[in-house]
Image: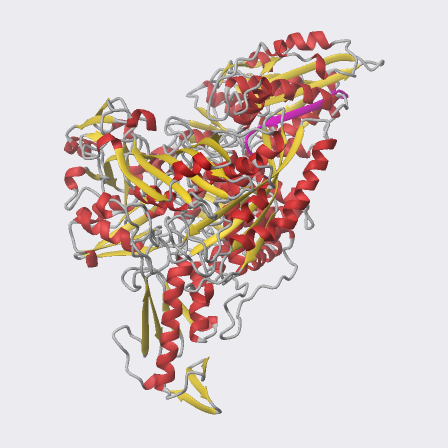
Amino acid sequence: MATTHEVPVRIGTDPIPFSVNGRRVTVSCSPLQRLSRVLREDLGLTGTKVGCDAGDCGACTVLLNGEPVCACLVAAGQAEGGEITTVEGLSQNSPAGARLQQSFLSHGAAQCGACTPGMLVAATALLERNPTPSDTDVMDAIGGVLCRCTGYRKIIAAILEAGTAISAETSPQAGAAVGKRLVRLDGKQKVEGTEIFGADETPAGALAVRVVRCPYHRARFHIADLSVFVREHPGIHSVLTATDVPGRNCYGVIPPFADQSVFAEQEARFRGEAVAAVVGDAEAVEMLNLADFPITWEELPPLVDIDTALSPEATRVHANRPGNVLVRGRVVRGDVEKALAEADVTVEGEYETGFVEHAYIEPEAGFARRVGEQIEIQACTQSPYMDRSDIAAILGIAPERVRIIPTAVGGGFGAKLDLSVQPFLALAAWHLGKPVRMVYSRAESIISTTKRHPARMRLRGGCTREGKLLALDFAADFNTGAYSSWGPTVAARVPVHASGPYRVPHYRALTRAVHTHLVPAGAFRGFGVPQAAIAQEQLYDDLADAVGMDRLEFRILNALDDNTPTVTGQVLGEGVGIRACLEALRPRWQTARKQVAEFNSAAAGPLRRGVGVAGMWYGCGNTSLPNPSTVRVGLKRDGRIALHQGAVDIGQGSNTIVTQICADALGAPIDRFDLLSGDTAITPDCGKTSASRQTFVTGKAAHMAGAQLRRKILEMAHACSCATIVFANGGVTVEDNGRSHKLSLGDMPLDEHGYVITSEATFDPPTSPLDENGQGIPYAVFGFGAHVAEIEVDTELGTIRVLKITAAHDVGRAINPTLIEGQIEGGVAQGLGMALMEEFFPGKGENLHDYLIPSAGDIPPVESILIEDPSPIGPFGAKGIGEQAVIPTAPAILNALHDAIGVRLRKTPATPDRVRAAILAARKGGAHG
Amino acid sequence: MSNLTRGLDRLYIRPKTLDEAAVLLAGEGGQVLSGGTDFYPALGDQLPRGRVVDISGLRELRGISADAAHTRIGGLTTWSEIIGAPLPRGFDGLKSAAREVGSVQIQNRGTVAGNLCNASPAADGVPPLLALDAEVELVSRVGKRRLPLADFIVGNRKTVRRNDELLTAVLVPRRLDDAASAFLKLGARRYLVISISMVAAVVQLDGSGRVAEVHVAVGSCSVTARRLSKLERDLIGAPVSGLATRVTPEYLSPLSPIDDVRATARYRLDASLTLVQRALNYCVGNS
């Protein structure tokens, strides 16, 4: 080609016209700006979520000329003249989209809601082309959108059944909300894209922050004169470092162990630790090349594994923690050595797990502003009151001067219990007096926030010839990383749970949380118990095999019951549903065993099948420590009810569950309630959303507050306790023995909270401290469950396909079966990820294409069996389910692997290379991989 | 638009014709943007530095056509377009690969040229095109050249494309139209996955049911995807029955896999052997 004419230079100085949701718009922005940014920041269409900026998560999926695309990968200039449809336009622009939104609601297909817009848009594109898709069509269509909450099955069902009516409750009768499949009360905004998450609001004129982070596992550093840096970078207002922390440059979720700095001083202890924050005009901060930041690093030798950290010559990560042991945990009962010596059969095992990343779809984000002598922080969080205490200490002000406004949370799973953006936002807004906003990139989220603890576990177990468990000796070290975070909780919780839900008369469980120079390990759905279950449940299979007993029957034989003491000596008395769970699995177990045997005996090729079972118990709430929730309910003059419930809904459904409980305790219909969130300025403390405590603890407080309000109303009407209260438009009427008494609410004075009547109740689960042997009452309520996994192994490639999970859970009372199934399916998905693919290596793969979580095509059908063995203390008998759901999946899969091909993996996850290596090693004569 | 981002405008040019694009690249040059599926992830949280020439508007680089000798796939053809195109049997493997590229969203934007020019060792499009003996056409202001794909990609994210050139088309010889073809991708999850290993195979049988021509390419196991030339030579004339059993580990010696977060090198070799056997079996109906 030899044209020589001058090119008419078509450059992007002109505004870019395109249409969005049928509306013509013109934007003036860099034509290289990502379309996702333009939609969110320039056009205010924040329904399109940004999860990774790399096409790895699909949260930002929009339709461009009818085709689903990741808006983060489209240049604004490429949208010129195009037609874009976002989640906000689905109901108007696509009948299929509108049907899908309804279907997502009725199926409970939206949990946290962060993937929901992308899912809906991707599914709309499918249904517009193919109104009757197959399962595979659906999976292909949504395979590019990651979800971390739902386990995909309800999303798939919602797409397959879009347009067909299914029974979901929207307005149950007064007093009949509990037990109903009530559509989640915050569902509408999630499917319409109007929900406000951490990154979805920006105050006018907000400055931006970028954090300078340590690029090494461990390094000393020196920051040069920052005034020069600020002067040379127009638009940069300030750089904050440790010297700018007016209060304590130290925080932590467990105050006695608080050790993490907002900004490191002199030495950074992990790759990703913050050392400074640059604050300035949003664009200047965005344009900034942090390579220019005036800092010099001196890399120091890091401790990166447990063994090195424990060796006598190891440097101390923290000077005050000798041996790099943060904390030890201990539960001892009976005489384990003697019992093991006397047991007919003993087995032992050693298991290892790696770091697991929470990988919620919403990276941490929020904004802060100073309001006079107060600071307000609106951000995604699981623990508003804990944030308030820590921010107050960091700023050196009273907690009452800190207001935390939690946004909707796009998944948390434990990592949003710890501070992330909050201290940077608070310090910048405090010092500069302007609103400040911050949104973590995916890399920043992965590099700097907590992980599941890697565990190294050694066990010995013994039983009688008849299969009666006699003893378990369990020792585990957890790599807790550079800072304490929830390490003490993991070390304390695991010894209480490592027996599993079985009677183990002689028991010793010793744990250590060990510091290294790696990212802090913290809370992740189960606080170490999922790791322990991987070890203990495989060991129990080995014991069952050793005595020649069916593995499920072995568990049933040893299952705890109401009157058997646990390993801490607690006798629960009522509500021990593990045996019922295991027995409920028996039909599926026996069928699956038979099918597997038939398949394998006929198999000529490389495929082998296996079936595995694992049990679980999990205590709801803090371990032997207070964790009260306070709920306030107010009757308004218009007869509506204000429910101040501070349990942050991170997708699990507490907004809905707590309201259902309160509504039935009060006897009011759900639609009379106005929900007030966990804003610390308006709602009392309901503690953190963790430890599977919100249904139980906050639910109980809501039950008490609702019942109390009912009593107060009845007293006001001088009615008996059997009277009916009718909440209707404009008023409240008490009907008592045929007499009807209408309360003149409009004339009544308002109390300090602005209500005609206020009731407030606090519930703190009754526990007792554990003694030096870990004996006592750690939890008032336990949830129980067990899973059966059926899998297929490709023995030539080492790949595993999970075919089905059957999950039986004793939830005490299923307050909302749809939401409980959602927790179970989501837990199964995370357990499957932990078993098969998830391992984070600090410094490698800090993104969502190297760190893999299950996609829609990886999750098998999940059959949930709900057992209701009521807890004597839980609201309407309810127990927690959030963490319970994740625990048995991984060990059930690993047991199925052993069933299929006779190998046990010492290291989880069972990635194809590890499985194949184990198969080859076993063939060579080594029994274990 | 603020003063700060206004500076970016001059950095973005979206030509409408190939001639314009060639002139631009011959002059000031710039980074080439098309589907954006590799361009944006590589940026991280930085903004692009230097000029960007957005070629996504070049209609003449779209579409698939054929003449007597070649099937011509325009460089800007997306993976979705490949999936949807009526193509001969020899392209079944390429279509399978197209379905395995990231996700529907990526397939809708990502282009064949982008996949080849980005030259990732794990590029899904490379093994099937290598197995099809594909050539690439490069156009610059000074002319046009054509070279085998195998000579185009020379290393991890390295090609012989000059900065003033665009990959305008991929050319696949028609003689393989009727060949059987297969593509197998091995990853640790179903969708959105970077492969641990992947294998493309193309098998042409002669009239007596013996192998007349066979091509096997393995990706993600070397800095670039590799053809297994010795295997291809040795299988000529082999009967269909037991074809896969002739593939022994020695034939994988052109591969030099590494250990990374996805798998060990050792496993990659072991699994690749299985994949090669399965791909061949698939092609000859032994699966």
- Outermost residue, right side: B208
Is A738 left, or right, of A490 in this rendering? right
- Outermost residue, front side: A342
Q: Is residue A313 above or below residue A769?
A: above
Total number of numbered discs in the rendering: 0
- Seen from the viewer's position, the closer of residues A369 and A754 is A754
Q: Position of residue A526 (x, y in %)?
A: 41, 46
Q: Is residue A182 above or below residue B36?
A: below
The reply to whether residue A560 is in sight is yes
Q: Is residue A802 above or below residue A625?
A: above
Is A649 left, or right, of B159 in this rendering? left
Is A617 left, or right, of A789 in this rendering? left
Quarter of image, res A716? bottom left
Q: Residue at x 16, y 32 (%)?
A: A226
- Seen from the viewer's position, the closer of residues A762 and A689 is A762
Q: Is residue B152 magenta?
A: no
Q: Residue at x 38, y 38 (%)?
A: A451
Query: How is this picture coloured?
Result: secondary structure
Q: Position of residue A609 (x, y in %)?
A: 65, 35
Q: Is residue B181 magenta?
A: yes
Q: Residue at x 29, y 64 (%)?
A: A682
Q: Position of residue A801 (x, y in %)?
A: 61, 36
Quarter of image, res A1? top right
Is A245 left, or right, of A838 in this rendering? left
Q: Is residue A641 above or below residue B74?
A: below
The reply to whether residue A65 is in sight is no
- Seen from the viewer's position, the closer of residues B76 and B96 is B96
Instruction: Tell me which segment is drawn in magenta.
Output: B177-191
Q: Position of residue A876 (x, y in %)?
A: 46, 67
- Outermost residue, bottom side: A739
